[in-house]
């Protein structure tokens, strides 16, 4: 008799969802940490919603939705990158304007096309349980690209994050590093969209990395911890979804956020306990 803990994963579609979710957790761990430390969180959120026009056009033309999402996300990233040095307004203003513009174009395309075949619910919330073999290959390919690029550019990314001026004096080409980082973010958001939808892709990108930064400091350790938290969230989320009959993608995203707050609360308790112990010893 199969254990209740393992029963959900005896179903092939749940097992594929688990593998796909773990692959996505790895991709997000490599990129999410840089997004947070570089203050690019709003860009990630805007990009997740700004993919609609690319997905809509790809659906109408019968193309690949992930490629459409990536093209739309990259257009936004390129616009932000081109205007990031503007003295007329801040980067947040640029991101906000591009976000609204891209989303508006997407809604216009959808509203004027009777042939739009993509379920908007799936676009927003994804369908992790519908992952197939080709989707797993796509996620594995994205992980390979992001992993190799992150390893090759680690020094440049680190210098760009903490001191862009020093990076320039050291000849580390921070402008190029910034562009590469935006491309990696584009790839991550596009493949995340294919698994958990646009609204939840942002949660998978940010929550595990934010949680990992509560318990680790060195970048490689933070990334590894983020991957572990994301993978555990996928496992728990699928298990809960199976027995509670909830939306799998949304449940996974909710678990990532709950894990963040659990670690945040745990750290607060430990800090308070240490302060209490120090005060006792001092008195």
Image (cartoon, rainbow, N blue to C red):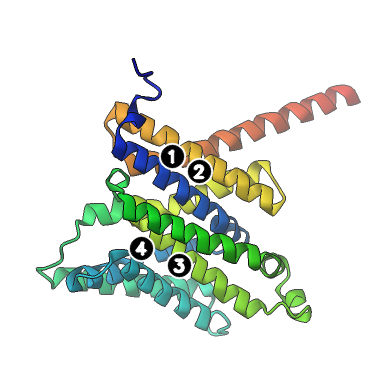
Residue 174 visible in the current orientation:
yes
- Report x, y in % for residue 52: 29, 66
Residue carrying label 3:
186
- Figure check: 171 above or below 2: below
- Secondary structure under tag 3 reads helix
Residue 38 visible in the current orientation:
no
- Report x, y in % for residue 146: 53, 62
**N-terminal-most mark, 4 or 3:** 4
Q: CA distance from mark 3 to mark 2?
A: 19 Å
Residue carrying label 4:
49
Quarter of the image where one finds residue 69: bottom left
* Image marks 4 and 1: residues in contact by CB distance under 8 Å: no
- Secondary structure under tag 2 reads helix
Q: CA distance from mark 1 to mark 2?
A: 6 Å
Q: Which mark is residue 234?
A: 1
> Mark 4 packing: few (<14 Cα in 10 Å), some, or many (20+)?
many
* Image marks 1 and 2: residues in contact by CB distance under 8 Å: yes
Residue carrying label 2:
230
Quarter of the image where one finds residue 250: top left
Q: Residue at x 57, y 46 (%)?
A: 226
Q: CA distance from mark 1 to mark 3?
A: 22 Å
- Report x, y in % for residue 118: 19, 60
Which residue reaches farthest top? 1
Q: Residue at x 71, y 65 (%)?
A: 162
- Figure check: 40 above or below 81: above
């Amino acid at each position: 008799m199969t254990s209740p803990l393992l029963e959900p994963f005896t179903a092939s579609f749940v097992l594929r969802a688990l593998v796909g979710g773990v692959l996505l957790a790895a991709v997000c761990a490599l990129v999410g940490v840089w997004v947070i430390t570089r203050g690019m969180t709003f860009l990630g959120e805007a990009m997740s919603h700004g993919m609609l026009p690319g997905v809509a056009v790809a659906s109408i033309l019968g193309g690949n939705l992930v490629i459409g999402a990536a093209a739309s996300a990259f257009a936004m990233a390129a616009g932000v990158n081109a205007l990031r040095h503007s003295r007329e307004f801040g980067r947040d203003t640029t991101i906000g304007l591009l976000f609204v513009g891209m989303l508006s174009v997407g809604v216009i395309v959808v509203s004027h096309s009777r042939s739009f075949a993509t379920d908007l619910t799936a676009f927003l919330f994804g369908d992790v349980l519908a992952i197939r073999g080709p989707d797993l290959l796509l996620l594995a390919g994205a992980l390979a690209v992001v992993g190799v690029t992150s390893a090759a550019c680690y020094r440049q990314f680190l210098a760009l994050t903490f001191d862009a001026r020093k990076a320039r004096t050291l000849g580390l080409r921070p402008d190029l590093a910034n562009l590469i980082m935006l491309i990696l973010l584009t790839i991550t958001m596009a493949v995340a969209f294919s698994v958990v939808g646009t609204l939840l892709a942002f949660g998978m990108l940010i929550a595990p990395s934010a949680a990992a930064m509560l318990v680790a400091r060195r970048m490689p350790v933070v990334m590894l911890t983020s991957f572990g938290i994301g993978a555990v969230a996928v496992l728990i989320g699928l298990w809960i979804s199976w027995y509670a009959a909830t939306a799998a993608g949304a449940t996974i995203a909710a678990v990532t956020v709950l894990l963040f707050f659990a670690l945040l609360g745990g750290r607060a308790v430990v800090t308070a306990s240490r302060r209490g112990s120090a005060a006792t010893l001092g008195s």
